[in-house]
Image: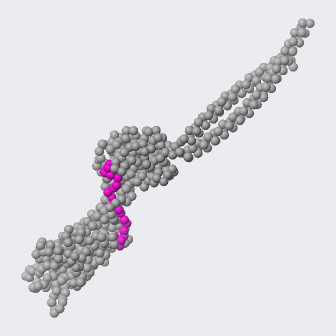
Amino acid sequence: MGLAASQARLLTITARKSDCEYQSMRYSHEKIALSRSMTDLSTEYQNSLNQTKLVYDFYGTGDETTPLSYGLMMTPSQMNGYLPILATDTSGKAVLSSQYAAAARAAGIPQEGLGCLPSSDVRNKFIQGLADSGLITSEAANVYMGIQYSQSIGMGATDLATTQVTEMTLSELIEYYETGQFDQIPYSYSNATMLETLQANNSQVYDFEIRSGSGVEESNQVTDGTDITLGEILDGDYQILCRVNINAGRKNTQDLSIAANNIASLDIWEWMFGEFEALLNVTNDPNVSSALKYARSKVENLLNGDNLGFKYSQYKTKEDNQNGFNGVIDCMNGVPRRYSGNWFEVGNGMHEAEGSYNTADYIGLTVYDNPKGDKSNHFADGASISVTNIALAYLTYFAQAMEGLATSRYTVDDDAESSKEVANSHLIDDQFTFSVVTGTGINSDQALISGFYDAIFNQICSRGWVENNRVTENDYLHEMMKTGKFFLTTCGDDGFYAQGNYSTNNFVREVTDEEAVAQAEAKYNTEKQKLNQKEEVLDLKMKNLDTEISSLTTEYDTVKSVISKNIEKSFKRYDA
């Protein structure tokens, strides 16, 4: 090899050897970085073995599967006993998610709170805000706003002053109403007592009777002191009869209004309305309240004779019939009521002017007059009404209003031109379901949920609130709790909310986060394998570089030796 070629080769070897040494150094640095990554990975894994989470164990069974979450704390359920669990900051303010904060703003509650409990109007704005923000439905909001605002819940009380509600058909309602009795009205409801009361108000009242079943037989008269329940009224044929004395020589049709007005003014009707309203007015639902008002007004119209036409049966002669009919028109001053002119003959041609009180087929008051009643010792003028039909009509009107007046399947024959007969009506039956208040205690879910949101409302009004859009993230919530930046505020046995650390809460426990540990272990093993593979590749590359460097060093020495010999030969040649 010539001198020039040898020198060129030496330069090439030198450059390649320098490059290999640089690559070897770079790989060495990468190995050092891998070693650091392995150390960090090991440290992270060791730390993860101590990772914990907060769990909610409501039933105290040692369950560790239910993580403490904002949704569990702030959504009504059996898990929180229908009392909210508040996350509060170090100043005691309630920490609200974006949705709850929007509802608070909609109600006009400042973040520092109101310092007092406002009116139900503000509370209803809060409920509407919950619907607007998507926490509850609009239908649910309407129901909750119809339930009385509980200012005491969470402010010294833990229980709602609510009632139990049961779904019942008419048959079931009748059976249940066996507990409601006539003696619940303001006086002892007996024939003798009522007669005495009515006679004290009007001396012309001759007789007063409660009848069970049709006809004039004495056996139909209800014995004084007998308890009659509202269930028996609905399921039977109970009638009230009021008769007045005959005053000879004057137009006795004036007495019809006396008898009718005495029946219409009886306290039994107010008692009946109260019984229905007490049992059917579930949690003050506005729709139910409106239906009850409608039923009451319609029945009062029946009792007062509004919009009622005439129905009269045959007297002994057509002339008597017409005379009696005209007399009713004159005496009632144009206020129409049903008119029945039936009368009876008993023994030896005597006219017993009992009149007709068979009202089982009719809805409303029946008045009757005896044309021959002006004879001495005769009494006939009077009025009667089917209490059973009035009670059924009330429930029918209620069902109409609940189903919708335009679409309801139920009808009461009560138009001005109608005959007011049961046969022409479609009265209440078992196809309709009543929601009946059956006792004091814990109410339906609707009342419990309404009370839950009332408790939240009461706390943010009294404590104030802050918005935090990350509070719904479990990891964030747990970390804030464990670091003491958030506290748990719960309702105690005394009915007041108190703030405390999660570690003192009976239902919250801090446990090893097995899932997180398992995930960390899987991550450690995977990352460790990747680092080991990278290290093995670097070791192989560094080994190859070492081999190449050794080879280049040998070749470098050889070429350098050749160059030295060539130079030595050249000097010897020119020296000679």
Residue 568, position as x, y percentages in the image: 87, 12
Please tell me whether residue 534 belongs to the stretch shown in magenta. no
Relative depth, front residue between 212 and 362: 212
| Extreme residue toward the top, this view | 575
Question: Where 222 falls versus 27 (above or below)?
Answer: below
| Extreme residue toward the bottom, this view | 348
Q: Which of the image's four quarters has the N terminus?
A: top right
Quadrant housing residue 392: bottom left
Residue at the (35%, 52%) spot, across then down: 158
Q: Which of the image's four quarters has the C terminus?
A: top right
Q: Is residue 102 visible?
A: no
Name the side, left or right, on which 447 lies relative to 382.
right
Please tell me whether residue 167 belongs to the stretch shown in magenta. yes
Residue 385, position as x, y percentages in the image: 23, 76
Name the side, left or right, on which 215 lies relative to 21.
left
Bounds of the magenta segment: 151-173
Residue at the (31%, 43%) spot, across then down: 114
